[in-house]
């Protein structure tokens, strides 16, 4: 399907979808494309490399600008009325909200406007129901069980937490399924798993003897050529470059077969079977292996949890 675009386009939004819309407009022949975002670059949800590539291709990003009105004439767009903003004091969550600058309105001369802001389910019809809604009109749920305020009703995904990712929605479905199963069987809901986050800086500190290597630079097509087609803009790595990149593994949580656990165990409780280590019945639970594991792969849990 052939899509015609305007000559001067304004895209409203700051996420990857907005970036995609702006870069697509460039490729479809728009002469000028600007992206209007009401916060700063640091708060922009789009990937940093996406923003950089868009700017290389000629997209102009306007920060701390909020759209007020799409101006039309004879049924056609003739401009976008906007207002300058600044970041105010932090709110309860610690995030600074955009505040309007008085008498700082202006008009962007554009002939097409593309809204590319977040999408949320319309749950306004539930406001008068027994379901509890948040201020953003999403369902209030128990974060561990996904239970709503209505008995026997569970929810997850965008309806409960707002726009997020597919893996987060799948995780919510899994939590809800476990809760429903426990409820139907008359047993307590399982304790939520411990959330473990891995900070790259901690991993680097644990591997001080390793030589830090920069990421292999991926070749890209020149911006002027990228603007004219929808071809993949990233080039290929040579075999040598691919091997060099693979060797940069940070070992962020997987066992690497270093054997330290077996060497430090004074009870010979850690045995190597093939390419895996097994802890035998000689283990006394002293915890020395967990302390010496360079990647924190080994952890101690109560016996009843291990049996379950």
Image (cartoon, helix red, strand yellow):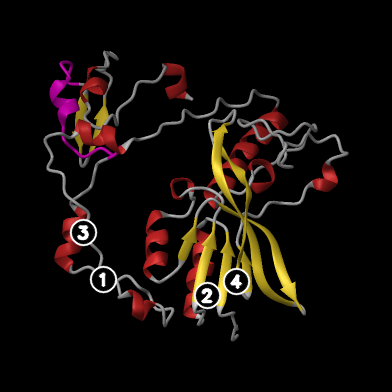
| Residue labelled with disc 1 | 236
Element under disc 2: helix
| Label 4, label 1: how far apart the Cα atoms are | 40 Å
Q: Position of residue 89 (x, y in %)?
A: 55, 32
Q: Position of residue 175 (x, y in %)?
A: 60, 37
- Report which quarter residue 303 is drawn in: top left
| Residue labelled with disc 3 | 216
Q: Nearer the viewer, mark 3 or mark 4?
A: 4
| Label 2, label 1: how far apart the Cα atoms are | 26 Å
Query: Sequence order check: which comes first, mark 2 or mark 1?
Result: 2
Residue 234 position (above or below residue 4): above
Residue 109 tag number: 4
| Label 4, label 2: how far apart the Cα atoms are | 16 Å
| Label 2, label 3: how far apart the Cα atoms are | 30 Å
Quadrant in which the N terminus appears:
bottom right
Q: Are marks 2 and 3 in contact (CB under 8 Å)?
A: no
Query: Sequence order check: which comes first, mark 3 or mark 4?
Result: 4
Q: Nearer the viewer, residue 76 or 124?
A: 76
Please state if 254 lies on the left or on the right of 136 as rendered.
left
Element under disc 4: loop
Residue 121 position (above or below residue 88): below
Q: Position of residue 76 (x, y in %)?
A: 72, 78
Query: Sequence order check: which comes first, mark 4 or mark 1?
Result: 4
| Label 3, label 4: how far apart the Cα atoms are | 42 Å
Residue 25 tag number: 2
Specify start and end residues of the magenta stretch as a single range: 252-268
Element under disc 3: loop
Element under disc 1: loop
Query: Sequence order check: which comes first, mark 2 or mark 3?
Result: 2
Q: Nearer the viewer, residue 41 or 205?
A: 41
């Amino acid at each position: 399907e052939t899509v015609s675009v305007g000559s001067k386009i304004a895209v409203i939004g700051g996420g990857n979808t907005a970036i995609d819309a702006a870069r697509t407009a460039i490729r479809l022949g728009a002469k000028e494309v600007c992206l209007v975002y009401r916060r700063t670059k640091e708060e922009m949800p789009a990937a940093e490399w996406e923003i950089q590539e868009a700017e290389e291709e000629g997209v102009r990003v306007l920060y701390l600008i909020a759209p007020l009105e799409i101006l039309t004439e004879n049924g056609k767009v003739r401009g976008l009325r906007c207002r300058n903003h600044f970041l105010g004091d932090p709110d309860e969550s610690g995030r600074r909200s955009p505040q309007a600058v008085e008498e700082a309105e202006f008009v962007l001369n554009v002939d097409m406007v593309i809204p590319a802001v977040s999408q949320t389910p319309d749950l306004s019809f539930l406001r008068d129901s027994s379901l509890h809604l948040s201020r953003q009109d999403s369902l209030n749920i128990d974060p561990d069980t996904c239970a709503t305020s209505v008995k026997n009703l569970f929810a997850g995904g965008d309806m409960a937490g707002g726009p997020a990712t597919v893996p987060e929605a799948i995780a919510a479905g899994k939590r809800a399924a476990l809760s429903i199963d426990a409820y139907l069987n008359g047993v307590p809901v399982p304790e939520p798993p411990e959330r473990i986050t891995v900070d790259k800086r901690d991993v680097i500190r644990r591997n001080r003897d390793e030589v830090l290597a920069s990421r292999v630079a991926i070749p890209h097509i020149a911006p002027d050529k990228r603007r004219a087609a929808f071809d993949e803009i990233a080039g290929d790595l040579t075999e040598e470059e691919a091997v060099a990149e693979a060797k940069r593994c940070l070992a962020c949580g997987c066992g690497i077969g270093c054997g330290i656990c077996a060497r430090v165990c004074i009870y010979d409780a850690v045995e190597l079977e093939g390419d895996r280590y097994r802890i035998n019945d000689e283990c006394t639970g002293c915890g020395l292996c967990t302390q010496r594991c360079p990647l924190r792969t080994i952890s101690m849990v109560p016996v009843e949890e291990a049996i379950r």
